[in-house]
Image (tube, grey):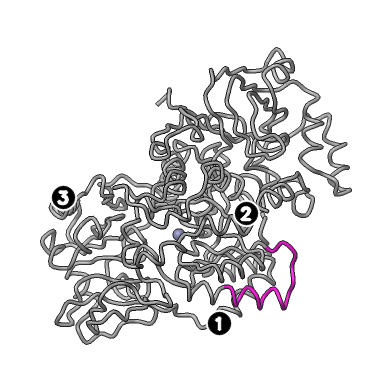
Amino acid sequence: MVQDIHRKISAPTPLRGSKPPTMALLPPVLPPSKRPALLGLFRRGSWCPILLAGLVRASTPDLIVHDAVVVTVDPARPTATAFSVHRGRFVLVGSDAEVLKTRGPSTRVIDLHGQTVLPGFNDSHLHPRPEFPEDSIHGEVDLDPDRVPDRNRLVAVLRSKAAATPPGLWVRGFNYQDTRLDGHPTRELLDRVSTNHPILLRHSSGHVWAVNSVVLDAARITRSTPDPKGGAFGRNREGEPDGVLREPPALRLVEAAGPKVPDPSWEQLVEGYDRCFDRFLSEGITSVQDAAGTPKALRAYQELARRGRGCRVGVLMQSAYLDIVEAAGMESGFGDEWVRLGGIKIVHGNSLSGRTCWVSEPYDRVNPATGRRDDFGIPPARTQEELDALVLRVHRSGLQPAIHANGDREIAMVLDAFERALHKLPKADARFRIEHASVCPEALLRRAKDLGVVLALHSYIFEHGDKMEEYGPRRWEFMHPNRSAEDLGIVVSGNSDWPVSACKPMRRIQSLVTRASAVGRVYGGSQRIPVETAIREYTWGSAFAERMEAVKGTIAEGRVADFVVLSGDPRKSEPLRIADIRVESTYVGGKPRFERSRQ
Ligand SMILES: [Zn+2]
């Protein structure tokens, strides 16, 4: 079933609207002499990658890679040993003999001596952000457990950041994990760092924060302050706010009371994104989908593309900017093969790893407010009617909705909204997306399948398996349900939700294959998937989610030449060692954008 769908959809089909990429960023695919003929084809709407491949083949390739183990993810030719590239696209994929005989005088030839090549990874949901030096005013302290394993270290690294920060300005940190620090940092702990600086730390989930007393006092949050709709303040046994903030409505109340930091300059911003994309490229990622896009980020991505930097980007614009996108007349697919509008990101629900998502059976934990096990998480602030109206509007505007939902009650609301929108305005192959769909029993998966929904499931049990303890073992077997979704023929896209989990596709694939946490505990073993399936999700599946499977995601003739060279073959690896496989080089459009040997 899954194979059938894969074959049907991955066969080369015309690009949406059958029009060529339009923005000037894209290098011409053909020699100038061929262009008029090609333009005629565009007009007649018969353009397709296979045809292009045939025309491009007339000239000799720019690059040939051979003596490789090429995992193509193309069901028509699953493996090969060689391929050629011309003007940024794969031209011929096959045996060494077939490909090498097409070499010309200016062809660069790379002998990989048996190394493994995969299509470039496509991280279908992450959060690119400009990376600033940690000691600059825009810099944040990385609190990843590998670096900050306990509370003493946490206090120490934050104290040194405070020492370098003028009093009154923010001390910010990100990526702390409560499960590795004996709980969330409280105001008392953070007051030990500084009582002269506002301190704001972001949990690895991106849905929970910890602040010190300076922040709570400035925002006048006291025991008599009620929880905002859609959010909650952590409280101690006496009901006093303990400095923990759950979900953005709680954050917004305190953040507005803090000092304003001047925005970075445009050049600082672009350079910050450049550092971030270098990180992605070094992990073999050639395409990303920004799951919280902004107009400013969209501009920065265009600037990077102009400079020949970074990788391909699909932008899921935050729903807060829907007015702007509609006013500009932009539909999903606007842009080119480098920077492109994917759709509209709607957050409807809360966090899995922050344990705030809204579920139908209570969490396995005592509710501090009642002393009982009756905590169902935080319901979304939006009503069903409001969600229905928003989804219909997005759909009517020619935009693909991509909706964040984790808890089963949140997912059910999203499916209801999808069903109603598609009933009012039917669309074949709509590919509405649910981002995460973490607690997803089979009945909901079947509904998703019937609606043609694509699922961007988490793959982060390696880092966040321990957060699943509060959901209880019975639920683990239908959380992050890759196996059940694949068995039903639902397309799943690979992603890290970085910085929620590491933007390391090899680690993500290991996590999908083993369902084992960093300490080796398995959560929901029935949802394990074969390594080949995990690779497909992280390449073709992610391309499908952004309607780009005819352009990228496989090593096949006519596709853009995005590929990664690995130090080992994940299909042959011990499952718990997949994450140890190194990325040796990353090619985007046939050009190396990361080479380990040059680092
Ligand atoms: Zn996200």
Instruction: Report the residue at 37% width, 78% height from top.
Output: 376
Q: Kindly check if marks 2 and 1 are in contact, taking CB atoms under 8 A apart as contact.
A: no
| Percent x, y of residue 557 | 72, 34
Q: Could you give the CA–CA distance between mark 2 and mark 3, rounded to whole angstroms?
A: 41 Å
| Percent x, y of residue 80 | 65, 27
Indicate the quadrant containing the C terminus: top left, top right, bottom left or bottom right.
top left
- Which span is picked out in magenta? 415-430
The extreme left residue here reads 192
Instruction: Report the residue at 41% width, 41% height from top.
Output: 275
The extreme top residue here reads 105
Within 10 angstroms of label 1, few (less than 14), some, or many (20 or more) residues? few
* Residue wearing tag 1: 386
**Total label count?**
3
**Sequence-first tag of 2 and 3:** 3
SS of the residue under disc 1:
helix
Mark number, residue 67: none
Type of secondary structure dominating the magenta stretch? helix
Q: Is residue 425 magenta?
A: yes
Residue nearest the observer in this picture, 429 or 69: 69
